[in-house]
């Protein structure tokens, strides 16, 4: 006889789940008496209690899988229900449409912007598709100012473009020389004695355990080659998953970065095997009928055809995103190992991309890149520009420009924050590419895009840990305390933001960029890694009270960037010009300044009161200015120059210690950075604070989902927190709640934001 659970599982009808626009009524008890519990594989759109959140207009519909577990005394039965959630209607109410301005050359086709910036009645700034009378591509036959009318797409609101027609159009250029240079990757290395170093070692240990044939599985299977009995990939790389292959690209980059960071030859051997095997896949794919020359992916070329027909997610899942990971991985291998075969394979891929994309119209391209998820292309513009730098082939820089994304670039060029409801990590890599395009072309527009974007994100969209976005999306500017959840701060966003920051700092040399960099590196990037050499990473870093880190090893985007993350730590520690050396971060490490024949060593010791830093020099005598960053969290004190008390100048902006002299072998500068707990309030709620110690953001170890109240209005913070170890280790007086840096936590429940 069937049990109550079996009968209920058989009989339960939920609703029409094919076109869902409203909340679902999910019963918790079946007609035959079993109890029913629900789970959802995407709680953003359908929660287990049946609450439905429709994707915003423009995101496309989403497919979610609900699972019901029917229980009765005789046992349990589960059933899954696919749910198709429709995207929301275009309910935009336009208050004001910003005028679009472009320049055009007389008699030559020009492209009007694919978007206009719109102020909505509900207080948002939106970069919205526009339709111009006469189309997006137009030619003007008279000099002077021309006006083109149009309307905001999907509405009747009018839009206007002013076109300045000139006889000869030259792009506005800016000098591309760097204000300060980074050292080549590998010149600086971490030394033992920090959590950063330990994490790097754990990631090295993990890389050595990876099955390279498994990483090649999807590529060999797609190319019709023997998979050598390797197990299939899992998670987002599983053979049925359309994003398969992306982790292999990250893995190539990780091996390359790991070699530069550690010099371990075992990872070089692994990389060489992968590159040679991928080259074999590329050759085999060329023999497959219908596949175009140079193609190399772990899935058939058909996904790219479908994207060109504007097929949406989940039928198409970001094929250029995956393509970017593999291309970037090959370039990283070429850079790290000088592997010519890696460059050859990358050139083939680049030629394939140029061939395919250069025959599409501007309109087709902007439509593709505007499609949510399916059109996500990672940093294709960055990788193609890198390919151009390494080969000199102009086709690659031309191809890089084909990824100019009006939806993001138009508002960012003007410094207008239209990031609300925009997917964060879909767009950050595009800006890294914009910066690279500036470096390769000198076009000021690309630098403006990168700079304005950085200012907007860091100025109005980051949490105290440096992470950005909630449920993968940006929200209204300066919403921090009001946007705390289990789904805050996706890890891959910080991977890309610190990468952008390193690149931009070389041009801008603004100390606040280093402040952000240090904050994010320690409190999000480092904090996202697991401590067990499993190569796992957090996806989100929960900032609502009472959650804990969950580490993901299912080949997600964040898992992929996490493979690379731990080998970048040394890259941002030192910078230089011809006659200056900058110490930007305080980490046990050393750097070879080859041009000067000088090695710089940094020792950092942490104790109860803060850090003791010693910067010392080895090598030939050399005259240069040493600049040591003055962090916002400590005033350097107790300065000793070669062991003697010394006065060292501070720059006018107060952000650098500066000392110019001839440095001899064995010279040193020593100082202390005193630390004590301090509060940082959320920008949108003075009652919500985080507690920091030096560069660390601290976490309160408690499972409570009610915000802890510190009571710092009644008594000072150093009475509330009692230090119970060396460095940033405290307990809350009276309750005994332990307080530790977020980056040191593993699976403990915690609160980062607490009440004052
Ligand atoms: Zn991610």
Image: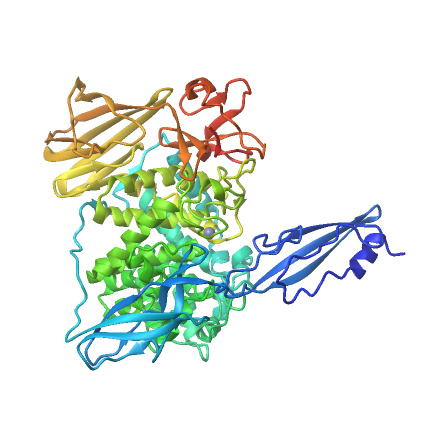
Tally the numbered discs: 0
Let me know if residue 647 appears in the view.
Answer: yes
Q: Which residue is drawn at 15% across and 20% down?
A: 646
Please give the name of the residue rendered at 33% of the width and 59% of the height, measured from the top-left corner. 411
Image spot of residue 77 (x, y percent): 77, 53
Which residue is depicted at the point 51% across and 60% down?
A: 56
- Which residue is nearer to you in this view: 136 or 502? 136
Residue furthest out toward the right: 1
Q: Quadrant of the N terminus?
A: bottom right
Left or right relative to 47: residue 484: left
Relative horizontal placement of residue 19, taking residue 1 as reference (left or right): left
What residue is shown at x 79% (from left), y 50% (from top)?
A: 29
Image quarter of residue 644 = top left
Colouring scheme, one of rainbow, by chain, secondary structure, one colour: rainbow
In the figure, 569 relative to 443: above or below? Answer: above
Vertical placement of 529 versus 84: above or below? Answer: above
Q: In this view, does 588 lie to the left or right of 38?
A: left
The picture places residue 682, in percent across and down from the top left corner, at 42, 37
| Residue 276 visible in image | no
Q: Nearer the viewer, residue 253 or 272?
A: 253
Q: In which quarter of the image is residue 613?
A: top left
In-front residue for pair 588/217: 588
- Out of 643 and 226, give the one closest to the viewer: 643
Q: Position of residue 196 (x, y in %)?
A: 38, 36
Residue 306 vertical placement versus 469 (above, below): below
Q: Where is residue 755 in the image (x, y as percent from the top left)?
A: 49, 30
């Amino acid at each position: 006889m069937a049990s109550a659970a079996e009968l209920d599982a058989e009989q339960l009808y939920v609703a029409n789940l094919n076109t869902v626009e409203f909340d679902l009524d999910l019963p918790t008890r079946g007609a035959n008496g079993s109890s029913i519990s629900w789970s959802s594989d995407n709680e953003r759109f359908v929660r287990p209690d049946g609450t439905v959140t429709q994707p915003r207009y423009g995101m496309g519909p989403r497919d979610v899988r609900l699972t019901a577990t029917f229980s009765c005394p005789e046992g349990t039965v589960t059933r899954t229900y696919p749910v198709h959630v429709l995207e929301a209607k275009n309910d935009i109410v336009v208050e004001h449409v910003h005028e679009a301005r472009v320049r055009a050359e007389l008699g030559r086709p020009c492209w009007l912007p694919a978007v206009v910036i719109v102020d909505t009645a509900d207080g948002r700034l939106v970069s919205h598709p526009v339709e111009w009378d006469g189309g997006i591509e137009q030619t003007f036959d008279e000099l002077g100012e021309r006006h083109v009318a149009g309307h905001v797409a999907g509405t009747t609101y009018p839009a206007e473009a002013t076109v300045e027609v000139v006889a000869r159009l030259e792009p506005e250029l800016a000098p591309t020389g760097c204000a300060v240079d980074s050292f080549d990757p590998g010149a600086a290395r971490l030394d033992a004695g920090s959590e950063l170093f330990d994490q790097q070692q754990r990631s090295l240990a993990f890389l050595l355990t990876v099955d390279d044939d498994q990483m090649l599985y999807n590529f060999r299977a797609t190319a019709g080659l023997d998979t050598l009995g390797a197990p299939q990939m899992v998670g987002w790389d599983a053979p049925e998953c359309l994003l398969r292959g992306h982790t292999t690209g990250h893995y190539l980059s990780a091996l390359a970065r790991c070699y530069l960071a550690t010099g371990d030859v075992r990872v070089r051997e692994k990389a060489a095997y992968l590159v040679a095997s991928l080259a074999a896949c590329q050759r085999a794919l060329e023999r497959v009928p219908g596949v175009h020359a140079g193609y190399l992916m772990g899935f058939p070329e058909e996904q790219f055809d479908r994207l060109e027909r504007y097929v949406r997610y989940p039928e198409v899942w970001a094929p250029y995103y995956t393509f970017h990971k593999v291309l970037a991985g090959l370039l990283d291998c070429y850079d790290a190992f000088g592997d010519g075969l890696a460059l050859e394979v990358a050139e083939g891929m680049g030629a394939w991309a140029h061939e395919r994309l250069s025959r599409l119209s501007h309109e087709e391209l902007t439509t593709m890149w505007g499609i949510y998820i399916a059109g996500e292309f990672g940093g294709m513009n960055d990788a193609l520009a890198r390919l151009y730098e390494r080969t000199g082939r102009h086709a690659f820089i031309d191809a890089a420009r084909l990824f100019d994304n009006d939806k993001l670039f138009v508002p960012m060029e003007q410094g207008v924050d239209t990031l609300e409801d925009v997917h964060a990590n879909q767009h950050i890599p595009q800006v890294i590419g914009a910066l690279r395009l500036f470096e390769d072309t000198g076009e000021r527009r690309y630098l403006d895009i990168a700079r304005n974007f950085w200012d907007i994100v860091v100025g109005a969209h980051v949490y105290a840990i440096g992470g950005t976005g909630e449920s993968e999306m940006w929200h209204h500017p300066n919403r921090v305390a009001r946007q705390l959840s289990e789904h805050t701060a996706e890890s891959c966003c910080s991977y890309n933001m610190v990468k952008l920051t390193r690149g931009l700092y070389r041009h801008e040399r603004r100390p606040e960029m280093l402040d952000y960099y240090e904050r994010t590196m320690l409190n999000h990037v480092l904090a996202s890694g697991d401590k067990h050499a499993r190569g796992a990473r957090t996806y989100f870093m929960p900032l609502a009270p009472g959650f804990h880190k969950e580490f993901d090893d299912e080949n997600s985007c964040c898992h992929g960037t996490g493979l690379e993350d731990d080998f970048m730590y040394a890259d941002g520690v030192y910078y230089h010009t011809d006659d200056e050396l900058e110490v930007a971060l305080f980490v046990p490490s050393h750097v070879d300044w080859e041009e000067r024949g000088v090695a710089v060593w940094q020792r950092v010791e942490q104790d109860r009161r803060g850090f003791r830093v010693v910067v010392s020099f080895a090598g030939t005598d050399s005259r240069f200015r040493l600049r040591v960053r003055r962090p916002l969290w400590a005033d350097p004190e107790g300065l000793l120059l070669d062991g003697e008390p010394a006065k060292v100048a501070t720059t006018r902006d107060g952000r650098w210690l500066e000392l110019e002299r001839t440095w001899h072998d064995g010279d040193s500068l020593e100082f202390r950075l005193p630390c004590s707990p301090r509060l940082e309030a959320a920008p949108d709620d003075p009652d919500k604070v985080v507690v920091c110690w030096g560069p660390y953001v601290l976490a309160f170890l408690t499972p409570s989902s009610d915000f802890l109240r510190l009571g710092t209005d009644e008594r000072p913070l150093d009475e509330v927190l009692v230090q119970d170890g060396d460095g940033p280790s405290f307990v809350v007086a009276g309750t005994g709640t332990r307080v530790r840096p977020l980056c040191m936590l593993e699976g403990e429940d915690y609160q980062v934001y607490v009440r004052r």
